[in-house]
Image: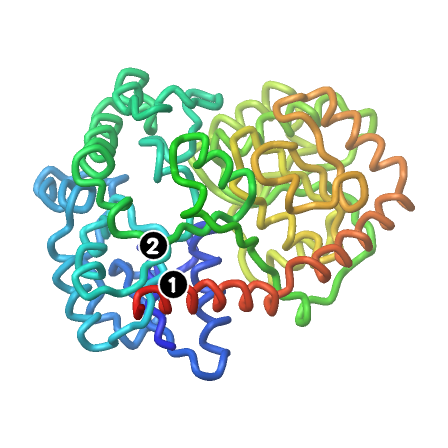
Amino acid sequence: MRVLLVNKYNFIKGGADKYFLDLAELLASQPGVEVAKFCMQHPSNLPDKYSNYFVSGFNYDHFQFKKLWQYLSGTFYNWEARRKFGALLDEFEPDLIHIHNIYHHISPSILVEAKRRNIAVVMHVHDYKLVCPNYKMFAHGQIDESCKAGKYYRCFLNKAFKDSWTKSLLVTLEMYLHHSILKIYERNIDMYIAPSRFVKNKLVEWSVPTERLRVIYHFVETRDIAPVYNLGEYLLYFGRLDKEKGVDVLIRAMAKLKSKNKLKIVGFGPERKSLMSLVKDLQLERRVEFVGPKYGEELEQIIAGAYLIVVPSIWYEVFGLVLLEAAAKGKFVIASDIGGIREAVEASRSALLVKPANVRELATKIDWSLANAKAVSDFAHEARAFVERNFRPEQHLSQILALYQELIKKKVN
């Protein structure tokens, strides 16, 4: 079986990219499976055999008027991507194409080439862009579902995408072109993979046919991870510093704790400055440390030294891969009960869930955890066992390959 994986980044920038790379490695380890990638050119990309086919890269965050056409084509219909993708299809001749994040860079133009060659296409849903111009369904500090029922214009009226009129207009027009006029996803995708029941249900609620959705949970490899069950001295948050991640809720909860434990914040993002100002306003400078982005062994050591990990999200998390990773490392988690997070834990056994944005409840459960070390240790053991039972790579690979074979068979017939 020859599988072509498509994602805009060939390096880890976010959770979707990590899954993309982990899946590529997992598939390539399987006898009889050959894997190729199609991505965007980027200086941080991993080396790749087919990188000469990768589409030209660009960055929306650093707008240059001279590259306006490149931005517009990346958003609406990237002819370069379609041409290079077609050339790669001719050389690699895949049996199936597995799409990940292609929005705003690669564009869905490549789907037309797949359809023309009658190749099976499955798309992994890593966010809500399939149904909502604002892919997070989150704007101005709160959940935003105002674009439901195809009312995409509300994204522009609410300046919902990155608080920008220009960007909101572009993604609004993009949705009308791709979904209302061309129906380019509807006509060219054979099946969508949702990483949680929550995501599947949300997409069905927003009009995606249930028969075209399959739930397959993410996985975590535990065989090479030795759990560290010892309880450290500090609380830990690691991830992007974005508004929807709720880090400000965690900082406010720190101000209400009875204990004086410290908090380490690992990561970077647009909210860093405002979060640092909040820490100063609450006079928590001695108890909250911004560590910056950390990776690899350095991050592993920080996680190992934590008492517990907090995931205070206030948006519809598609699943909560960080909870699986924390559990695999033998760490107890307190997380918001929102989106697909509940499906990543065994509620009341391997983690504590709190209402999103509820500062008082979060502080209360952190205080309880700090006062009950034995229970926290027991929970951490439960979490590791839960992950080992339910999120093994072998289980994931079996489900993925079964779906691949099902879709390929349909195309042949």
Work out whether mark 2 precedes mark 1 in sequence or the reverse, and give the earlier one.
2
**In this rendering, is residue 30 above or below 265?**
below
Residue 249 position by quadrant: top right
Extreme residue in the bottom direction: 31
User: How many residues crowd around disc 2 within 10 Å: few (fewer than 14), some, or many (20 or more)?
Assistant: some
- Give the residue type at disc 2: Asp
Quadrant in which the C terminus is drawn: bottom left
- Tell which of 390 and 371 is nearer to you: 390
Q: In the rendered view, does 294 fall on the left or right side of 362?
A: left
- Marks 2 and 1: CB-CB under 8 Å? yes
Residue 61 picture location, percent across and down: 28, 39
- Tell which of 263 and 170 is nearer to you: 170
Secondary element under disc 1, as helix, strand or loop, is helix
Extreme residue in the top direction: 157
User: How many residues crowd around disc 1 within 10 Å: few (fewer than 14), some, or many (20 or more)?
Assistant: some
Residue 161 picture location, percent across and down: 32, 28
Question: How has the structure been colored for display?
Answer: rainbow
Q: Which mark is residue 143?
A: none
Residue 138 picture location, percent across and down: 44, 27
Q: Which residue is mark 1?
A: 407
Residue visible at 30% across and 65% down? 411
Q: Which residue is mark 2?
A: 190
Secondary element under disc 2, as helix, strand or loop, is loop
**In this rendering, is residue 175 above or below 11?**
above
Residue visible at 27% across and 46% down? 185
- Give the residue type at disc 1: Leu
